[in-house]
Image (spheres, helix red, strand yellow):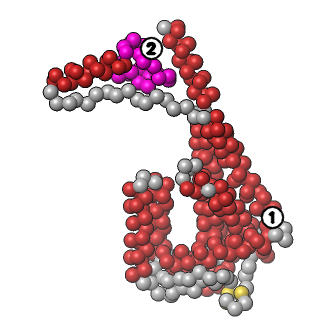
Amino acid sequence: MRCPKCQFDHALQTTECLKCGIVFARYLEALERAAKRAGPALPMAVPAPPLAYASASDRNNAVRELGYRALALPLALLVARLIDGTGLGMASAMLAMVLHESGHAITAWLTGRWAIPLLWVTPHGEERSWAIVLVMTATIVLAGFLTWKAQHWGWVLAASAVLILQVIFLNLPAGAAIVFCGEGGAMVLATILMAMFYAPRESALGKSWGLRWGLLVIGALSFMHVFRIWTGPFEDIPFGEIEGVGPSDPTLLTETYGWSVTQLVDRYVRLGTVCLAFLAGMYVWALVSAYLQRSRSPSSQKKCIWTERRHLAKR
């Protein structure tokens, strides 16, 4: 607690100040009597509540969380890469397909077109509807306002990023953007799923063990499946026709929209690299925050208390 007279910060709650020697209760009573004699009530300095030490279980949770944050993401990406190179890679392809079609649909909505994500295909409108644009903008702004009001700053930043993305897409050729954001959207959405692993521990997502780890696994498998295609040999790129659907996305981008194969690969690789850089930043931030949380354990607090006692003894 903090002394109301000299502002010395006590690590242990005491009845008197270890620096200036005042008795807290008597000092506050004197201030209160003086305030009553002076007339209107004056704001008084109130000592802070005693320091609440974390329990042993809290410390164990903090140490365990530090280990999870150090190992989970790198191992998830490594195992996903190994799985995608085996016969089990079909599972990664199915998960990536869901994010792929979602990427098409979300991009179409942001450009003001209707879209319905289905398995292996996403029908969408060809003409922009300003009604859809207004609905999307209003939805994003409302989500940002509600999260700002609730002081969920991470979601406020996310809503701001989506709003900026909408403005960018409205000024790009919609057809090429929708096609490109199949594979591109899959990588971005997979990155978001993996980043959710670092949600605050007190949040609903942080408390849900299955959901938290499940999203990490889905994101890692999907991301590595798509990223491996575009960082591998050109022969693995799915050019050609999809039965019952039509030309594949790479074929549309090269033959309909005039992209060269080099441009196509370079843009996907650049996007994947940005996603990995974002994950690296999240990884470092998560490690630092988990380490600071661990440093507030009972053993660390007791060490600070003994240090302060030695300091006072010398004085």
* Marks 2/1: CA–CA distance: 62 Å
- Give the answer, above or below, for where 203 lies relative to 165: above
Q: Residues within 10 Å of mark 1 (few under 14, many from 20)?
A: some
Q: Position of residue 126 (x, y in %)?
A: 50, 87
Q: Can residue 281 be seen in this view?
A: no
How many labels, in total? 2
* Residue name at image x 32 percent, y 27 percent: 45
Which residue, as the protein is rendered here, is positioned at the far top?
314
- The magenta stretch is 1-23
For badge 2, the amino acid type reads: Leu
- Give the answer, above or below, for where 256 lies relative to 268: below
Is 103 in front, or is 38? 38
> Disc 2 on helix, strand or loop?
loop
Q: Where is residue 61 in the image (x, y as percent from the top left)?
A: 65, 42
First in residue order: circle 2 vs circle 1: 2
Query: Was residue 228 drawn as part of the magenta stretch in this picture?
Result: no
> Disc 1 on helix, strand or loop?
helix
Mark 1 highlights which residue? 83
Give left or right: position of 281 versus 229: left
Q: Where is residue 287 in the image (x, y as percent from the top left)?
A: 63, 43
Q: Position of residue 70 (x, y in %)?
A: 69, 46
Q: Residues within 10 Å of mark 2 (few under 14, many from 20)?
A: some
Query: Was residue 14 drawn as part of the magenta stretch in this picture?
Result: yes
Tell me where residue 94 sits by quadrant: bottom right
* Residue name at image x 73 percent, y 58 percent: 77
Mark 2 highlights which residue? 18
